[in-house]
Amino acid sequence: MRGFDCVSELARTYPTSGIRAMFDLAKDYPAAINTCNGEPNFETPEHIKESGMRAIAEGMTKYGSEAGLDAMREAVANKYNREFGGHRYELSDVMITVGGVEGILLCLLSVLNPGEEVIIPDPTYTCYLGQTLALGGVPVRVPLYEEHGFRLQPEDLERAITPKTKAVIISYPSNPLGAVLRAEDGERLARVIEKHNIVILSDEVYEKIVFDGRTHFSLAQIPRIRDKVLVVNSLSKTYAMTGWRIGYVVGTNAEIMRHMFKMQQAVVSCLPPFIMRAGADAIDGPQDCVEEMRRHYERRRDLLVDGLRAIPGMKCFKTEGSFCTFINIKDYGNAGFGSRRPSDVARRGAHKGLRYRAKLGGTHDAHRR
Ligand SMILES: Cc1ncc(COP(=O)(O)O)c(C=O)c1O
């Protein structure tokens, strides 16, 4: 269309995902091992698939309510009542979303005004940055350091907070770092958070994939800051349901949640009820499949981390949770390629697997996930 600028400034400048670029490119390299997406290689457990198919057969194929199917919201509320305690979670504390990605978007849509700042650790999962920019927010990157186990330090958080700060997005267990938050970190962070009018988006989609006997800790477990925390979670990783696109937000701030339900009208109206039926049965049903997958991931983590550490010059943070292994290849002189051109990296063809640094952040140029 000549003479007519039909593409928005946002679309033109939206940060492209290096992960997606590598994923597409991998199709052209049959010998490559594609480790681009955080994708379980397990099938969704049979009882969950059957629940979804049964729900379709029973006619759960119409529009549903914005906040989600009551059965699913109840399953989520009960899960948090079992696991968190200290607060009686109700349906009104739960919003069902199209995966964790839409959960993050709905949180931002509900709290962020254009020009307000969102603190985003660096490196991080890519979509936080794009979504913040899409809503006219200003991302403020806070580096995470290996000497602190890649856990956000309260003094770094405090330094980044300004009168314009509206939200902080944290992700533990972390993609791309594989780090896990400890209860003592939470306490130290809470001392900063309680002093400021800020909202914490806590992306916990890897909560069940933690290793070495650790347990997941959420900032929402600290009563005095609970109302400031929006927990974003998903069934994608826990139940190998990435393609079902189902997740949720849990928050005890009634004002935010009420508006979040409304904001779903602007995005997808509602989720498919049959997907939510299966989601409820995943959460309410047997959990041995979750532990079995977790054990597999832990074995693979051992294999990968031990194998990488055995290579001279290869340094590797011992993954504590999630699917990610974060490798320091500084001794290889950054391997002769920069972080921004994953396609070039793959085309070089000097390696069998796929590696990428993608646009996860700028602090760790000598690292690969
Ligand atoms: C940290 C993190 N959050 C959220 C997501 C989104 O997952 P989904 O939308 O499938 O729930 C991912 C996916 O890889 C992720 O790594």
Image (cartoon, rainbow, N blue to C red):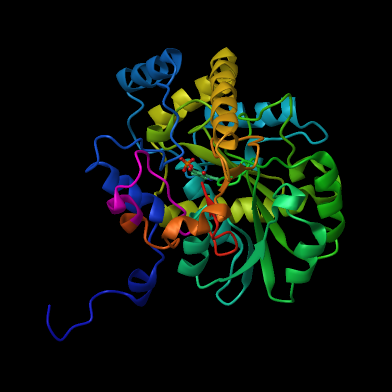
Where does residue 120 sit, x and y in percent of width and height? 62, 61
Residue reaching furthest to the front: 312
Give me the residue at 64% from left, 40% from top. 173
> Which of the 4 image quadrants contains residue 297?
top right
251 vs 126, nearest the viewer: 126
155 vs 66, nearest the viewer: 155
Quarter the N terminus occupies: bottom left
Where does residue 15 sit, x and y in percent of width and height? 41, 65
Where does residue 181 sit, x and y in percent of width and height? 74, 42
Tell me if residue 358 can be seen.
Answer: no
117 vs 307, nearest the viewer: 307
- Magenta span covers which residues? 345-360
Tell me if residue 92 can be seen.
Answer: yes
Q: How many marks?
A: 0
Q: Magenta span has 348?
A: yes
Q: On the rendered structure, is 99 left or right of 259?
A: left
Give me the residue at 50% from left, 25% from top. 239
Q: Magenta span has 25?
A: no
195 vs 14, nearest the viewer: 14
Residue 183, above or below 139: above
